[in-house]
Image (cartoon, rainbow, N blue to C red):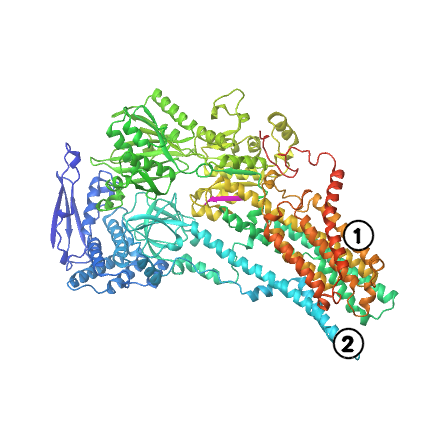
Amino acid sequence: MVKTFMEVTSESDDKSSSEKMTADSISVDENNVDENNVDVAVDEKTSPQKISLEITSGDADANASTPEISADSVTSQSPRMGGALAAVLDSSLRSIQSASSVLSNMVNAFVQVTMSPKTPFPVTAKDLSDLSNDRTHQALARVLEKAAANLPPCAPGEEEELKSARVKIEALVKRIGTSEEDAGHGMKSGSMQELQRGHDLESAANALATVILRSRPEDGITNDAVDIEFRRETFGTNAIADKKLDSFLKLCWDAVQDFVLIMLIVLGIIGLVVETTTLKEGDKCGACWLEGFAILLSVLIVVLVTASIDYAKQFAFIRLTRSLHETNTKAVVRNGHQMSVTDDDIVVGDILSVNAHNLASIPADCILLGPPISGGLKMDESSLTGESKLISKKPGDVVLSGTTAVQGSAKMLVIAVGINSVAGKIKARVYDSTDHEGDGLDGDEDSPLFVKLEKIAKQIGIAGTLAALLSFVVNCIKGFVFDGLSPRQYIIEYIVVAITVLAVAVPEGLPLAVTLALAFSSNKMMKEQNLVKHLDACETMGCATTICTDKTGTLTSNKMTARSIYTNGTDFSCNDPSMSLGDFIKSSPDRPKDSILTLITTLIAVDTMDETTVEFEGNKLTASTGNPTEVALLAFAHSLGENCQDLRDSIRGRSLKGALSEFLVEGKQIEFSSARKMMSWAIPKVEGGYRIYCKGASEVVLARCTDQLTGSTSALDDETRQRILGVSEAYNRRGMRTLVLAYRDLPDGTDFDAKSANILNADGTEALEVETNLTFAALVGIEDPLRPEVQGAIKQCYEAGIDVRLVTGDSPNTAVSIAYQAGILKDFHFTYGSEEKIAANLKPNVLMEGKVFRRKVYQIDDDGEKEFDQTAFDKIWPHLRVLARSSPDDKLTLAHGLNQSTLYTDKRACQALKNVDQITVFPDRQVVAMTGDGTNDAPALKRADIGFAMGIAGTQIAKDAADIILLDDNFASIVTAAKWGRNVYASIQKFLQFQLTVNIAAVVTALVGSFAYAKSPLAAIQMLWVNLIMDSLASLALASEPPTDELLRRNPVNRSKSIVTVRMWANMLGQALYQLVIIMFLLFGGPNIFGFEPGHIVEREGLNSEHYTFIFNTFVWMQLFNEVNARSLNGEINVFKGMLRNPLFCGILVITAILQVIMVQFGGKALHVADGGLNGELWGWSLLFGIGSLPMQQIINIFYGQCAGFGVDGRHPLRLKSSRRLSMRTVQ
């Protein structure tokens, strides 16, 4: 046995050397050590203190008990074991258990020298997948054991090192291989045994990274393309294979299930059978089969078109999925640098940097690496396990993909990706199942638009069926009862006529038109920075009446820069945009002492998140990641000449690199939360105790300050506090966000979880005691300039009848400054005669702070629970324009309250608002659009009618909850979404206006023909061609109409009324009347006027008549010219306006016209037209009657205007229809 003593002097007069210990002071016989047996003796009776570390050799009794040292046996406190002595024991144990670190260093060099990027790994993807499935320490031990046996060959002369590596791994495996239950049996919290096992697991995780997967916790893997590709080949990719697409044939089969198409197939087959089997003796069939064949061919065309659209939708979903994946990025460490990569690009061996505030969702199965960060990591695994309890993770634990980090930050080693991960396997199984419903398009059928359209289609279908039955019954009675015809001979003909009536009545092209319009709009919106996740969100946005928007990055450019700082009693404000704030301070004659600047830069370096990084070329910021506010602070520190990363790496308790990373656990991180509105980090001081650095909202942190930094520490009196508040308000009025930087020195034994009895957080909960009694260091003003396009976009919103409310976490004056610059606030929102545009001068309820808002809209019930008060909310929201210092819960409350308000039912209150405040409340619920970027914003995004997530600054959970992702985080893109949403609705209306006109005219024509001659003048095959125009070509043409700015000068789309407006009915009935007059004129008067034989007589002889061909041609040309009219919904005089902006519409119109000429002239029996077509005179009349639709529209416009009378167009341009509610003042 080898025994060594370490002495730690504890001099009361020299605290700087109170705790000194090095690993060199330990003498260990490394060739004969059993690391399962460590005896520790503590002698606290003598001074200096002595710690006996007894290491038994391998031949000692393996079952010897190990004395325990718990937190109770130590008087001084520390974050790890409860005292200064425990900290020494902690470090000693790390030195004793150096096997894995020695192994890591040894094999690290071994890997560098001897291994190429394509050297096989000692483990397989299955081994690591089994580890993530088992999620036990025993499974980790098995992986390490197998890896030790499979370590690759080494270079000559390195055999002993490889052998030693295997021995070290085997020792580690032996220690961690026991089950968690056995390992924890009789183990006290804080005991040496527990500490030893924690270190073993930490060592195992680090060994798995360094030795097995050739990665480093500090530097990650190389960013070499060969290495990364080899890892993908070995362990798989993190991209799940696309869902298996339905085959084209399957989609064709689905399309054939349509009732009308089935009837047409039956009709075609019956036609073929009847025409070819009922020939009279001596007759030849010739082309008798053509009509039945043409019907079936038309059905085939419709089926192919429908299946093609559905097939294209599948690829559209794949493109959408890939676009979403491109917005999901994570921070990984490669080549020693933190970088952002997409989830799909993450490979096994990557070091993933996770922070609960920014990067919450875990993209792959991981092992948590050490050292553990103070505060620990807590995961929400409910998405996989259903257990809502948060799970604490320690180094060596498996963290599953698909789970969420809700507290803490950490580094993780990726061990399983794609289908080898737990979530990936579930996803793959779901994709292979037949009941999968996650393709992103299924929800479209339940949207309000589809509900209304399906209702219309059903009503028209019922009407068409009744018309078909009426035609069949009337013909049977007329033919069999009155004319005495043989049922056997004419029953088929009557059925054909009835089916013809049904075919023209059912709007088969309606779903196709909607799909085309939504798909076309979503694709175009993608090009304008709107990634649409759900197609129906396009249409819903057209109904929006209120937009609740964030400030940072949405209204502003998200390029935050520190422009002002108040410290040491002096205000430093840099107004020269070419000069940084740091350079301005250094050149100032009132420059603060170096000690103050050093403390400020140290505070910034310590109290910023690891995920926030900056890169410079000289003094120019070239790249950054993470929180924009922290980027501004880091850039400010850089301008003062300090590299925050280097400074952070040199601080014990904060460093993640080098030897100091071993002591990261000694630091204490208190993460930012919306409840506290601040963030803190405590680090150990050399002389003992801690220093906690804090930053946060100026009014929150300043209220907790009792001292100030002025070269030394002095009391913060009321006069100085008011002076600081005055400077803060001045910064706020300039539109700057203000933060206070503060610190506090804490003694040993501080309880970091203790609550303050007097000070509360922003949400009313008790504040942490360590975040009180702070010393004020500086007030920083950070500028985020308004986006140049925002003012115009907000003006467009008001012109479109869409209200805009600002919901921000900034101070009231900052929020007012930005809202006024953007145009959300107008002069009339301020009290009369006030010159300063500040919060204090606003009228009541125009601005409200979050805490005041919550107090007013929530009441406490009898059980002491908070209950939302809709009545109180209704007194506030018509006035509310800015919600400052708000929390994510306030967003949820605002979205819910607006959506559920029934204020419009209180006529007296509405009238009072109109008379006193000039606010009009419309009698319908608000349709709310909400923006958000944080994980906590997800409930509000879900609750709103349309949720917009930020593509750049947004977290993955926010993006998952949203309907639309703003790829550029720009408010102007929301206005674009509103414009396209209204365009979708207008496109559907245009198609309906066109199709229903055809339906009305065709059904009446078919009925009149069947009543008069027992045969429709429009043959079934001809009406199929008309339907083909409606279903495919016209829907494509009208659905592709681009939006115009005129759409944003109209009222929001009314969701509660029918999609077919009164004006549309006027257009449809007027055009249908014109067409019926022409058709009836040609049907009954055409033979006499144009000199051809009546069609019903010619048709009885089995020939195709020129009469009916003329009617068919005229009917189609009237539809084609009316298609131009259908582009106008509101009685526009110039129906050709903007037509050339849509080349697709023009092209389809020309193609349809050419096809009509070909079919009439050369269709013959196949299309039931006269042989040789029509002569020039009849063609001229057909075109003339068709052109007549254009002047007919102007007559309709004049007639409608006269009938409607005064008031239709005399409303205020900002007023909405009676079914929409919006609170808004007249825009000046």
- Judged from the image, the secondary structure of the residue bearing numbered disc 2 is loop
622 sits left or right of 469 in the view: left
Residue tagged 2: 279
Residue closest to the far front: 1176
Can the viewer see residue 513 in this picture?
no
Q: Position of residue 145 (x, y in %)?
A: 26, 62
Q: Main secondary structure of the magenta part?
A: strand
Residue at horizontal 38%, vertical 24%? 727
Q: Where 956 sits versus 756, above or below? A: below
Q: Where 1178 sits versus 67, above or below? A: below
- Judged from the image, the secondary structure of the residue bearing numbered disc 1 is helix
Residue at horizontal 25%, vertical 53%? 203
Q: Amino acid at mark 2?
A: Leu
The crowding category of the residue bearing disc 2, from other C-alpha atoms within 10 Å (few below 14, some 14 to 19, many at least 20), is few
Residue closest to the far bottom: 282
Quadrant of the rendering where the N terminus is positioned? bottom left
Residue tagged 1: 1077
Quadrant of the rendering where the C terminus is positioned? top right
Residue 290 location, quadrant? bottom right
Q: Nearer the viewer, residue 1025 or 270?
A: 1025
Q: Position of residue 405 (x, y in %)?
A: 38, 47
Q: Which residues are magenta?
A: 946-950
Q: Nearer the viewer, residue 948 or 76?
A: 948
Can the viewer see residue 1099 in this picture?
yes
Q: Where 678 sits versus 981, above or below? A: above
Query: Marks 2 and 1: in contact by CB < 8 Å?
Result: no
Q: Position of residue 46 (x, y in %)?
A: 12, 39
Q: Earlier in the sequence, mark 1 or mark 2?
A: 2
The crowding category of the residue bearing disc 1, from other C-alpha atoms within 10 Å (few below 14, some 14 to 19, many at least 20), is few
Q: Does the magenta segment cover residue 1160?
A: no
Q: Amino acid at mark 1?
A: Val
